[in-house]
Image: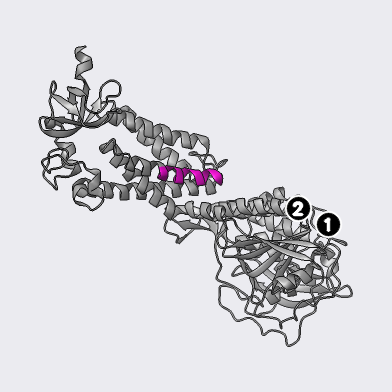
Amino acid sequence: MTLAVILVIGLNESFSRTPVDPPVAPGLAVPAARQAKNVAVITIHGPIDAVTSMSVQRRIKEAAAAKADAIVFELDTPGGEVGAALEICGAIKRSPVPNTVAWVNPDAYSAGALIALACREVVVNEASTLGDALPVKLSFIGMINAMPEAERQKFTAPLLAEVVDSARRHGYDEKLVQGMVSRGVELWWVEKQGTGERLFIDRAEYRMLFGNDPGPSSPRIVSASGQPGPAAPSSPPEPASPPSGGATAESGRGTSGGSDDRGFVPASPSMPSKLQGQVSMALDAPSQRPVLSAADAGSWKLIEYVADGRGLVTLRDGDLIRYGLAAQRVRTDEELKVFFGATNVSRLDRSWSEAMVGFMTNPIVRGVLIVVFLVAMFLEMTHPGLMLPGTVAAVALVALVAPPLLVGMAAWWEVAAIVLGILLLGLEVFVLPGFGFFGVLGVVLLFGGLVGTFVPQGSGGLFPDTPKARSDLLFGIGTILVSAATSGVIMWSLGKHLDSLPMFNRLVLKSPSGGDEDGLDEGGGLLAAMGEAESAARIGDLGTALTPLRPAGKMEVGGRVVDVVSDLGFIEAGARLRVVSVEGPRIAVEDAGRARA
């Protein structure tokens, strides 16, 4: 069973490294677009999910309200949910503080790579890694499942549009960033003679510029094929000139050349035309990448073979700087201060409440809460008046519903369905005979509402119309079924042994003779009591209320203690009762004194 679609850590990475550059030196000129007096550092650590998105957006607003001049997103993440990553990217690009910098410290895989590229600039620590953002699907137990190509394309289109938009905004090479999201991206790095402009080209462009197919060689970026890359250069490479027509990270716009066109040029020759069209329609910023033609032959020279297309582009810190994706290395907060020429650097970490919400929305935790809720509700309905199981069920229900409400995974109708389902089940157990229409409807509403809390608002609810929403729905159904099965086993075990278990036996009242409250021998159990309830009393029998009936409670009749339900209104303890109906385990009574009056 497939569940949430997420971005996960890739296996391929570049093993080639450039020599370590010196620490950031104080006193160097800081570009005007980067200068900041007050810098806020927003940490994004661990897997990225809806709670992460909510937290990051809150902290962006907090940084803007505090008059921050720059926001740094410190990334150390293996990836996460597609929707959450795109929400964070959108929040960064819409930020009221345009001076945004991603600090890859140390790793930004998949969803983290998308977030890093959304920032105006990127800096890296030692041994940092960025890339590999191919969408994959996880099963219920967290294993990677095969994804049909048609479904993969639905997820790939918004990711390609996101990274290409980031490249156009911030001057990164469009074809290089495509290699982080899409397979089959084979790249060569070339330089224009005379101007020093550098560009990543595909095989078709290579033939156009050099008049022949490239010869056999090893790519610099080692793919999943495991090929060794070339040795690192013996001297530091020249800083990469602004890619894609001279765009710079400071300006975010191209300054020369290029076609003012929203059209999307795929880096992979095998990319379906439908996918190309979807990406092109999603792009707003014009491309600054120069359009190559046969007239350019002889004006470009080859620097190196970059990627063979058999894996996803994943870059280490040296190549991130070499290819113009990262500005420089930043190792500490002090170096970060020097990078901006800043006076103050303050951190905005995830709050304890957000961490708690993240913990409470964890699938395993939610599954355990569902088990606790169902078992406690079962105990309360089979032993009415004890209060403790009902209190536990209520607390578990609040813990189940409140966190999803906070992160947009639950809506009012889902909460209403859960509450109404519980009320209908109570009506069926305590008021109406047997287990009929209201009981079935109660179960459907209860479980439907719980499943709905796994599907984010705006995703179609119980009728999702996107792959992500359908995956979330399957995840919710799987969690509910496993939890319900676990609860059934626990209920059966409690029914057999409740009165003999430490602590739990206090939930069963004892008769004066020493047996349980239903007059059974010790070990008779809850299920036995339920099975013999019909023979415990007959219509017309008189007895005494041992507990208040609101409307269910305990009655002593013929020397036995049985569970009964008031047929009309509430009855206080000590009242004289008459049995008016016996249907299966349900015994209905009335106030005998009130009936004679």
Residue 554 in view (yes/no): yes
Q: Which residue is mark 2?
A: 263
Q: Position of residue 595 (x, y in %)?
A: 21, 15
Residue bounds of the magenta highlight: 395-408
Q: Which residue is mark 1?
A: 259
Q: Is residue 339 above or below residue 494?
A: below
Q: Is residue 247 above or below residue 446?
A: below
Seen at 50% across and 34% down, the residue is 413
Seen at 53% across and 43% down, the residue is 405
Quadrant of the rendering where the C terminus is positioned: top left
Q: Position of residue 368 (x, y in %)?
A: 38, 52
* Image quadrant assignment for residue 34: bottom right
Q: Is residue 108 above or below residue 138?
A: below
Closer to the camera, 68 or 483? 68
Q: Check disc 2 and report its element: helix, strand or loop.
A: loop
* Image quadrant assignment for residue 24: bottom right
Q: Residues within 10 Å of mark 1 (few under 14, many from 20)?
A: some
Query: Disc 1 marks which amino acid?
Result: Ser
